[in-house]
Amino acid sequence: MNEFHGRTVLVTGAAGGIGGATVRTLAARGADVIAADRSAESLERIVAETGARPLAFDLTDEADVARAVDGLDLWGLVNCAGFGGLVAPAVDAGMDMFDRVIAINTRGALLVTKYAARSLIRLGNGGSIVNVSSQASLVALQGHVSYAASKAALDGITRVTALELGEHGIRVNSVAPTVVMTPMSASYWGRPEIEKPFLAAMPLGRWATEQDIAGPIAFLLSDASAMISGVTLPVDGGYTCR
């Protein structure tokens, strides 16, 4: 399968679970993948596995983003880098933690989009951008005020950039995953008092896998979704249809 042959796609958060699965999926489908994360060391494994090109930068630093991204010859972008923060009620929210979540999940994604979109416009071949949002942007989840705010803002960025970039043939969409059960996720979502009622409320009744998210990302990047732009696609086992 070579549906992305000749297309260069930048994937942020490539050292993480969903980011790594996305790199593998796109590389297997013929894309020239640039795998980005904060350090070159964190990218060694996914680069060795897929042949992706590594690119290290700090997405909270505009000068570093500009240095790394501006001038790349890109066709696509996946904003997958993210930070969950701490699970805490709004009345106990720490503003330093809130600011960090926003800096990575919202501001960081906008910065990468800002410079990547210039490349897509310059090349004049259209393109596709996919932002990794969350079901937390669509429904209220206890203790997730900072994360929900960051992802709801990211969905707003998705819609505005879809409107602004459409004239250049560039599509922008989001995916909104449910929980992908990793060791880090398990510290909260794996608690019986949290897991049992949550899965009981989900029609498909299971946690997502990393590949469950990478597949829809690849779809929204591909020509199979050529008339889809400005949407946030829930990938949540039906949780938000309640």
Image: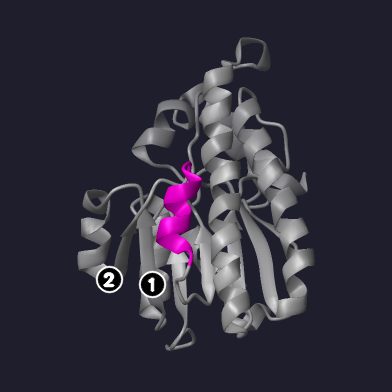
What residue is drawn where x is 37% and y is 76%?
27
Residue 66 colored in magenta in the image = yes
Q: Is residue 135 left or right of residue 71?
A: right
Residue position marked by numbered label 1 in the rendering = 33
Q: Nearer the viewer, residue 225 or 114?
A: 114
Residue 38 colored in magenta in the image = no
Q: Give the extent of the magenta segment.
A: 60-70
Q: Nearer the viewer, mark 2 or mark 1?
A: 1
Quadrant of the frame with the C terminus: top right
Residue 45, position as x, y percentages in the image: 22, 58
- Residue 50: image tag: 2
Instruction: Classify mark 1: residues with Cα within 10 Å, few (<14), some (14-19) or many (20+).
Output: many
Above or below, 49 against 124 in this view is above
Q: What is the three-letter code of the residue carrying label 2?
A: Thr
Which comes before the other along the chain, label 2 or label 1?
1
Q: Nearer the viewer, residue 106 or 21?
A: 106
Q: Residue 145 occupies which quadrant of the picture? A: top right
Quadrant of the frame with the N terminus: bottom left
Residue 186, position as x, y percentages in the image: 41, 33
Above or below, 16 against 165 in this view is above
What residue is drawn where x is 60% and y is 67%?
117
Under tag 1, what secondary structure?
A: strand
Instruction: Classify mark 2: residues with Cα within 10 Å, few (<14), some (14-19) or many (20+).
Output: some
Q: Nearer the viewer, residue 20 or 181?
A: 20
Residue 148, position as x, y percentages in the image: 65, 35
Residue 94, position as x, y percentages in the image: 56, 15
Disc 2 + disc 1, Cβ < 8 Å:
yes
Q: Is residue 94 left or right of residue 9?
A: right
